[in-house]
Amino acid sequence: MEIFADPMLVEVLTGIGGLKSLDVVRILRTKGEISDYNLAQVMGLSWNKARGILYRLYDRNVVGFEKRKDEKTEKLMYYWRLNEAKLSHILVERRRQTINILREKLMHETHENLFSCDTGCTRVPFENAFEMEFSCPDCGDRLDMVDNSFVAEEINSYIDHMEEAISSWT
Ligand SMILES: [Zn+2]
């Protein structure tokens, strides 16, 4: 899958190794295996920078390496590979977390009568609205009961979307 087609993958990778880690992963995917020396060349980075990104990805087990002698130079080199399974595992975990948060929000939205002002700066259950004397603490407008069927529908479709994404990865 193209990296930028999956916003969560972009977020996860940049979170681990910064923006350049997107290029690293793309290159590893295309080449299968590459030495950090060559990777630095391909990316136009210093050797240290390239290794820095690789180490951070390695720290999360997203890449692995093998130490081998270069056939021509006889020098010991580190050859890096992408751990695609681990990467999708991280993504699945992230999506599950998001789904759990959404489910909680959905429960909150559908099992309680929520009160909000017109602008929506406050969104609270009845007892809080009661304490606030049905007046928004931010804008002062009246707090009315919210019709949250639309919100619930939206959250539901988002959860469906996420679950689809998970099943496409596993
Ligand atoms: Zn308000």
Image (cartoon, helix red, strand yellow):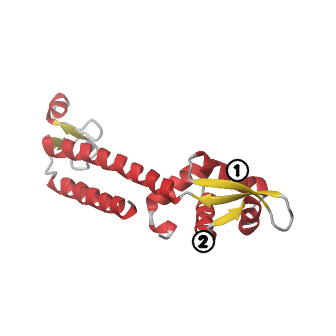
Residue 87 in picture, x, y percent from top left:
50, 55
Foreground residue, 78 or 136? 78
Residue 151 in picture, x, y percent from top left:
21, 54
Foreground residue, 90 or 49? 90
CA gap between label 1 and label 2 equals: 20 Å
Q: Nearer the viewer, mark 1 or mark 2?
A: 2
Q: Residue at x 50, y 70 (%)?
A: 2
Q: Quadrant of ligand 1?
A: top left
Classify 127 as above or below 83: above
Give the secondary structure at mark 1: helix
Work out which quarter of the rendered image holds the C terminus and state it: bottom left
Q: Inspect the image, locate mark 1, and give the three-letter code of the amino acid beneath it.
A: Gly
104 sits left or right of 10 in the view: left
141 sits left or right of 39 in the view: left
Residue 142 appears in the picture as rendered: no
Classify 143 as above or below 84: above
Give the secondary structure at mark 2: helix
Residue at the spot of label 1: 52
The extreme top residue here reads 131
Residue 6 appears in the picture as rendered: yes
Residue 18 sits in quarter: bottom right
Residue 133 in picture, x, y percent from top left:
16, 31
| Mark 1 vs 2, N-terminal side | 2
Q: Residue at x 19, y 57 (%)?
A: 153
Other residues around mark 1 within 10 Å, as few (<14) / some (14–19) / many (≥20)? some
Residue 109 in picture, x, y percent from top left:
19, 45
Residue 25 sits in quarter: bottom right
Ligand 1 within 8 Å, label 2 CB: no
Are the two marked residues, 1 and 2, in contact with CB atoms closer than 8 angstroms?
no
Residue at the spot of label 2: 30
